[in-house]
Image (tube, coloured by chain):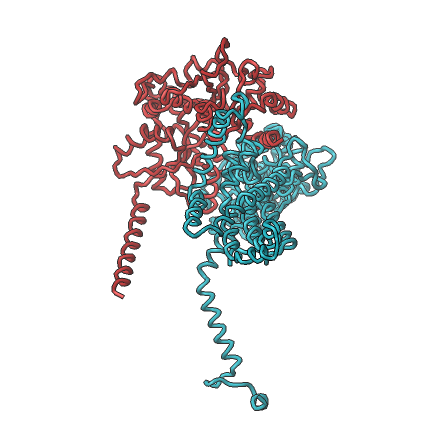
Chain colours: A cyan, B red
Amino acid sequence: MTDTTTSGPMLSADGVPLKKSLARALRRQKLRALILIAPLLAFVVLTFVVPIGSMLFRSVENQIVSGTLPKTIEALETWEGEDGTLPDQEVFQALFFDMFRAAEAKEHTKLGSRLNYERTGFSSVFRTTGRSLDDIGEPFQDWLEDADPAFADGLTWYEMLSGTGGEDLIEDRRAIWANMVGEGFAGDIGFTLSGEMAELLPQTAAAYSDWAIYTAIVDGDVVAEEDPWETVYAALALDFARDGAVSALVAYSGAGAAPIANALAALPSLPEIDFRAAFVAENEGWGDTGNWQTLKIYSPDYTTGYFLNAIDMKKGLDGAMARPENQQIYVKLFIRTMIMSLIITGSCILLGYPVAWLLANLPVRSANVLMILVLLPFWTSLLVRTSAWKVLLQQQGVINNILVWLGFVDDTNRLILMNNSTGTIIAMTHILLPFMILPLYSVMKTIPPSYLRAAKSLGATNWTAFWRVYFPQSIPGIGAGSILVFILAIGYYITPEIVGGTDGVFISNRIAHHISSSLNWGLAAALGSILLVLVLALYWLYDRIVGIDNVKLGG
Amino acid sequence: MKLSKTLLATSAIGVAAAGLAYAGGHMASGTFTFVSWGGAYQASQANAYTTPYTANNPDVQVVWDESSNEAVAKLRAMNEAGNLTWDLVDVVAADALRLCDEGLAMEIDPDEILAPAPDGTPASEDFGDLLVGDCFIPQIVYSTTFGYRTDMVPAGVEPPNDICDVFDLETYPGMRSLESRPINNMEWALMCDGVAKEDIYDVLATEAGQEQALAKLDTIRDSVIWWNAGADTPQLLADGEVFIGSTYNGRLFSAIVEQNQPIGMMWDAQVFDLDGWIIPTGLPEDRLARVLDFVYFATDTQRLADQAAYISYGPARVSSAPLVGTHADLGIEMAPHMPTDPNNATNSILYNFEFWADYRDDIDAKFQAWLAQ
């Protein structure tokens, strides 16, 4: 030993330090192991981590609002909204351009559906406004075309605004489009913006760029040959109305100077610019401060709104508040899901324990027959088993018929065994029973019968021998079975849906409703996330109280 | 060694063959995926539309996907995944409106893609008001109405013929079955609580009106089984579980006429609704061309009338009504079983699409909270 310490690091046969060579060999081994588990790893990541991650993300994601109405949201920042006044004209102007853009890309109704989850009526506000935006811009178009017919020709606009130096603005507008539609708006648009114009007529330059990008990339048309949207006309009117704009424009002598001069001359007949009145006239919803408050509350890219909804609260201007009592449902459902799952787990233990004991202690031949009886329902389709329970449990069903025939129950007073929580508990206990019996059986199989005999030979009664000797050894099986049954029960969907009626349904039925029917996927994701956290918390609690080491599936 | 080689070789051939078959099935230009409701309704569409169409176009293979119930959610998921496998989707009008709002259904110009009536009336006039939204291609008018057990009507009492009989537990004791959603139930409740038919939606738009409707439903709540699937009520009626229940009129027709159950129809205050096609957005050119060709064929006057020979739903075209004939198997006249027949439609409500598009989320939340109480 002393030799090696004095003569430097220990070398392997090929002269490489042993430590290095060992590390290399280990690394190779680890890599090989990794390759072996790679399919499983990829599978787990793809089918488990990614969906759960995207679900968690969806429960807070809210980019649709600022993506669809970016400038409106910006302008809305200064609006307090508490004193019942409507937002400024500026907000409505931004709304006009944002909405127009969104309506062209058919994104506005998506936002309407999204906001309708938070406040009734948004859906139709967006749908109807989207149809009539042209009307709001038309007076300005008429005015400009009256002032100089050249404005009716797309080429006038193209020449007036073409140039160099406005690239930044074009890029900004591309980003706005890409944010809203969710795909790239890169590529040549056959138009470059004049920097001078971007400064002189900022609104017009922005509106024209919006149109040019959409026309070239989405419609695939040539910008110079097309006539711009009404927004461009309205933007020019707004630019004219800006303080100091007129004096700067008088000095302008570039392309399109003549029509601009004509328009300036016609300024006295410029229609009144009142986007607020125009929007309220198109749809009263825009005159409702409540709607604007909702828009403001839900303007951030990430929101706690879905989670608050999922615990019967709602987001207000100054924080969270409870929902009115006639809309509270989720907390109740969570509690019900927990309690009923516990009851189901309990009844599975009560029913499964003796069966598992029989299985473990009968001679092999009869135990096998019994095992098949346990497994047979396990192999039958879930839907078939649940429907069979329907036939058994309904008021004119088999069980009630037998009870009436035996005289236990009056014919006019048949038992209500389904379409309530009783039905859910009965059917689910039956369906989940094998998950209790199998772990119990495999644990009981390992308890030597000699222990019981020893206890009895030492003077214990049957009960003492069972309770003090046998039962403690079977607890790991109960633990494993309970965890399985409880966690399966908490997320159950089909059985409560079919036999649960109204007071026997679980939170998962509401989640399914929001996924497939109301399409409020954000709320469904929030409910699902809460359910996941609840399960993890209960697992942790279980570990603290019982100890997860005490769970055995066998051996 | 030899055996394992043979096994390997055969399985390789098997895999290759399966792969080819798969590619063949998907590359064949004629595979056409329809989404519908399954059951008798889908069968009626197959008989009236796709069978004659494939007879004319032998290279087209029809695949049915029974997903109409979750069509909106599935289309949205397909859209997000960027993999559209459906060609034509059958949905109710309310879902078509939502799909249109979400940009998942293609906007259509009825006069351009649909055949005119035989007398030359353009499609937009022939379908008229039934063209709800910008994407919907109507096929049929159906109604949600009531069926009752004829043998459970108390002695000496007229069979129920008024919507308010549903709320009258004294005269007509027994269980009821209603759909577990606010739509239709709220309207019926208000109608039987003294609100005039034309005021229903004005009242229902208010908080007080919603409470009034729920309070009325409260009076029969303990006697109601809430259903989720259209097949529930016919089953509950057939088993004698309920005395009276709401469902789609076609379901009741087949229970009464085809299965001879002791069930009677109560048409009062039936709620008309529409079902039809939407074309999903984002179909490639060649598939879209084929879909349009099929839609032109399948929505013409004769085809819509043909469907009525298999199921008791009214054709959506005005010009189809006179062509409705007899049931294909039973030979009975179909007209008297149509929800749109003048004798049946004396008192009816038309599903208010605009209203429910706005109020669905809000009223549904209140309704479900009420149910859970």
Q: Is residue B340 visible?
A: yes
Asked whether A437 or A164 is in front, the reply is: A437
Relative to A208, does residue A171 appear above or below in the rendering? below
Left or right: A360, with B87 as reference point: right
Name which residue lies at 43% across and 41% down: A381
Q: Quadrant of residue B265?
A: top left
Q: Can you say which quadrant of the picture contains the N terminus of chain A?
A: bottom right
Asked whether A72 or A489 is in front, the reply is: A489
**Residue A231: x %, y % from top left:** 56, 38
**Residue A118: x %, y % from top left:** 62, 36
Asked whether A237 or B310 is in front, the reply is: B310
Asked whether B266 or A422 is in front, the reply is: A422
Residue at far right of view: A83
- How many callouts does the rendering have? 0
Name which residue lies at 46% across and 20% down: B147
Q: Is residue A147 visible?
A: no
**Residue A107: x %, y % from top left:** 52, 39
Left or right: B309, with B359 as reference point: left
Relative to A88, does residue A359 appear above or below in the rendering? below
**Residue A32: x %, y % from top left:** 45, 68
